[in-house]
Amino acid sequence: MTLNPQYDTLAKTFVQQFYSMFDDPARRATLASFYKDDASMMTFEGEQFFGSPKIMQKIQSLTFQKIAHSITAVDAQPMFDGGILISVLGQLKTDEDPPHSFNQVFVLKSQPEIGSFYVAHDIFRLSLHSM
């Protein structure tokens, strides 16, 4: 399979959509459309979840009232199977807490039969260091 020449544009568009939906409580539940029931995995702070229902259960269980992602950098690479690897670096502000740096990695898998992508892998980690 050939590499997707639009990988960078697709990655940046996905990241913008994902975080705008995540940061809006009224739209957060629609993040489920990015994941598949039987083919998506998420690791959130070392805890693993498989399938859209479990991933959304975790996302909905987060206790903050307000959230804002500020993106510093988006790096992307095309994958040989038509997918896209995305690394996001940014800061996360929840409620009245100070901002924390975070890193999130996505693997988007192509669904050529319907002309779209889904999140096959999602790894999120705050950049907290303890001595």
Image (cartoon, grey):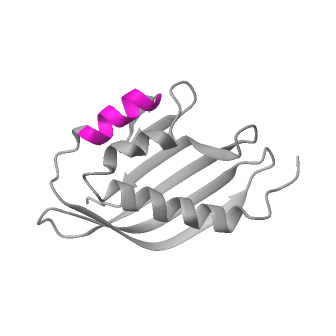
In percent of width and height, residue 96 lies at 11, 66
Please state which of residues 34 and 49 is positioned toward the viewer in this rendering. 34
> What residue do we see at 71% from left, 48% from top?
83
Please state which of residues 68 and 125 is positioned toward the viewer in this rendering. 68
Q: Is residue 12 magenta?
A: no
Magenta residues (range): 51-60
| 89 on left or right of 38 | left
> What residue do we see at 26% from left, 51% from top?
26
Callout count: 0
Q: Secondary structure of the magenta portion, mostly?
A: helix
In percent of width and height, residue 94 lies at 20, 61
Q: Is residue 59 magenta?
A: yes
Residue ranking furthest to the right: 1
Residue ranking furthest to the top: 38
| 79 on left or right of 74 | right
> What residue do we see at 48% from left, 41% from top?
33
In percent of width and height, residue 107 lies at 60, 47
Give above or below for 102 relative to 51. below
Give above or below for 15 relative to 32. below
> What residue do we see at 64% from left, 54% from top?
85
